[in-house]
Amino acid sequence: MSKYDVVIVDDDASMAEVLGERLNKRGYNARFYTSAEEAFAGLEAQDAGVVITDLNMPGVNGIEFCRRLVDHRPNLPVIVITAFGTLETAVAAIRAGAYDFLTKPVDIEALTIALDRALEHRELREEVKRLREQVDSEGAGGGAAMIGESAPMRELFGMIDRVARSPASVLITGESGTGKELVAGALHKRSDRGEKPFVAVNCAALPGSLLESELFGHVKGAFTDAREDKEGLFVRAHGGTLFLDEVGDLPLSLQPKLLRVLEERRVRPVGGSQEVEVDVRLVAATHRNLEAQVKEGEFREDLYFRFNVIELSLPPLRERGKDVLLLAQHFIERFAERSDKAIRGLSAEAGRALMQYHWPGNVRELRNYIERAVVLALQEEISPEDLPPRVRGAGGDGRDVPYLDMLTWQSILGLDGLPTLEELEIRYVGYVLGRTGGNKSRAAEILGMDRTTLYRKIERHEIAPEDAGES
């Protein structure tokens, strides 16, 4: 995939073809689909750098298509275009995760600017993700990132010490975000294989055909895109540890092949005739109930027993008591150093809010919220105002935060013609400020942006409450 690969989704094939030709002349590699369903299938076969989608399409419309893409491919920016440029649709598109929103007829200059910014945004996000994963992996050997003094964590640490040097397979279970890959890394580094490769793969992230090729490798010509031999992850992990995350999502068709490799310790690349001996210690993880999947015929019983020689169950964050505060302090120190900010820790009120929250996303959610708080913090301590509304709301799940009912921009903002997106935003921010009596924190909640961003917009555009008017 080139970063300049652009996917256009529009039920008007002639319109999509013309737009694609114009983009190709400007150096992009554009291809188009006439429905969201076709686009999903096409993106599974060949990724893209950015997606442009029409709003009004039969079947899955542009808003729902955007929402699904963002859920499954959060790093893939989406630009929504429509001939019906209302405030309601603009807000709906942005809330669905769209990177930008343009109206028809599409100005090619404005579109190319939006494309370039979207591609830069994607590159930045991927770089940040790469650096974050690198930091996490460096701390995965039972070091600073595995923090906890609660009884469940002390029990877990003891189990890791007891089974790390065993060659037996380990199944790590627990909710998403509890740190399963950290535990797998700790098992590896404390084992006799600690100096050998630690290779990880998320089984839910790849379709069955690609996952088989990733695990076992393939030979040149095995399928259409197999232009050269590829070494599989079993071979790459030889002598070390292979970590299979989300094994509950393994396709049934792949499970007997995987079982054979684990039993015979030999792997045959896709399309190949020669087998290769492999020596790996297998660690698997899942947030699913594999026993229930076995009973329902969705997972092979023999493979389940092969995985589950030893089971390590990770406790959810809500059951770890004051570990929440220990982890929060660790993340504050990490992100404050990275941001070069002198933040010492949590205020008592912020600590209380963290302790009362339910943490459905576990440690991953806590880490993300602390990173956000470090960015927003203006004092030496994190305050409740630096935390998301759902956290500082005494453990609420966010559903108690009301959103303003939307009317069309014509009736609510009193604008003539089609305004630019910037004009629309300025008027709407002023309108929300007026409805909240100038309360910037409450306005930021309704607008779905942090306070710092709202302050910058108010200052830059000199926005005042009731700026939208009531005409």
Image (spheres, rainbow, N blue to C red):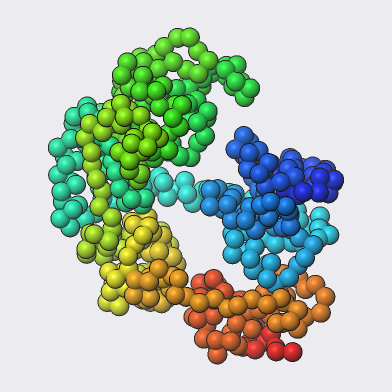
Spot occupied by residue 8 in the image (x, y as percentages of width and height): 73, 47
As drawn, 195 above or below 127? above
Residue plotted at (38% across, 33% down)? 297
As drawn, 402 above or below 319? below
Is residue 357 left or right of 433 when viewed as pictured?
Answer: left
Picture quadrant of residue 274: top left
| Quadrant (top left/top right/bottom left/bottom right) for the C terminus | bottom right
As drawn, 313 above or below 66? above
Residue plotted at (44% across, 65% down)? 372
Please indicate, yes or no, whether residue 172 appears anywhere in the rendered image.
yes
| Quadrant (top left/top right/bottom left/bottom right) for the N terminus | top right
Picture quadrant of residue 180: top left
Spot occupied by residue 142 in the image (x, y as percentages of width and height): 24, 45
Is residue 40 left or right of 335 when viewed as pictured?
Answer: right
Q: Nearer the viewer, residue 296 or 54?
A: 296
Is residue 80 left or right of 270 when viewed as pictured?
Answer: right
Q: Nearer the viewer, residue 82 or 199?
A: 82
Residue plotted at (47% across, 17% down)? 269
Residue plotted at (44% across, 22% down)? 216
Spot occupied by residue 122 in the image (x, y as percentages of width and height): 59, 51
Q: How many marks?
A: 0
Spot occupied by residue 258 in the image (x, y as percentages of width and height): 39, 24
Please indicate, yes or no, whether residue 367 appears anywhere in the rendered image.
no
Most extreme residue toward the top, as rendered?
273
Q: Nearer the viewer, residue 372 or 214?
A: 214
